[in-house]
Amino acid sequence: MPRANRRRRDDVPLNVDRAVGGLTRRESYGGTEWFVRRVTGASSSRAYRCPGCQQDIAMGTPHVVAWPAEGIGGLDDRRHWHTTCWQARERRHTTGSYR
């Protein structure tokens, strides 16, 4: 017997931001405010270097993207962090290069 498809409730509006790329939160780090978004492994298309541990984030690995909330930030202002490194960001010192 085929499975019945569940219909979306019409009384709950669709959150387009969440459907497209997850929810963006505002968090503090280093005395400034940052926008933070979790990225699924399926949506990451290349490897990045985590500024928290200076190790590569392999392609296909879920991680966190953070960018400054103040000012006009471009794509170059985004930083890709391991989720655990972002959670421990106040205990880590970011040194070295960013990719």
Image (cartoon, helix red, strand yellow):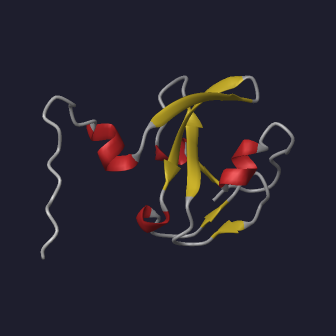
Q: Quadrant of the C terminus?
A: bottom right
Residue 59 falls in image quadrant: bottom right
Q: Which residue lies at the image location 70% right of the left edge and 46% below the top edge?
A: 86
Q: Is residue 12 left or right of residue 10?
A: right
Q: For the image shown, how many numbered marks are present on the structure? A: 0
> Which residue is at a point 77% across and 51% down the rendered structure image?
52
Q: Quadrant of the N terminus?
A: bottom left
**In percent of the image, x 66 and y 52: which residue is there?**
83
Percent of width and height locating residue 17: 32, 39
Does 32 appear above or below 55? above
Task: Tell me if residue 59 comes above or below residue 52 in the rendering.
Answer: below
Residue 62, percent from left and from top: 55, 61
Q: In the drawing, does residue 76 fall left or right of residue 29? A: left
**Which residue is more in the foreground, 61 or 51?**
61
Q: 83 and 58: which one is in front?
A: 83
Front in this rendered view, residue 91 or 8: 8
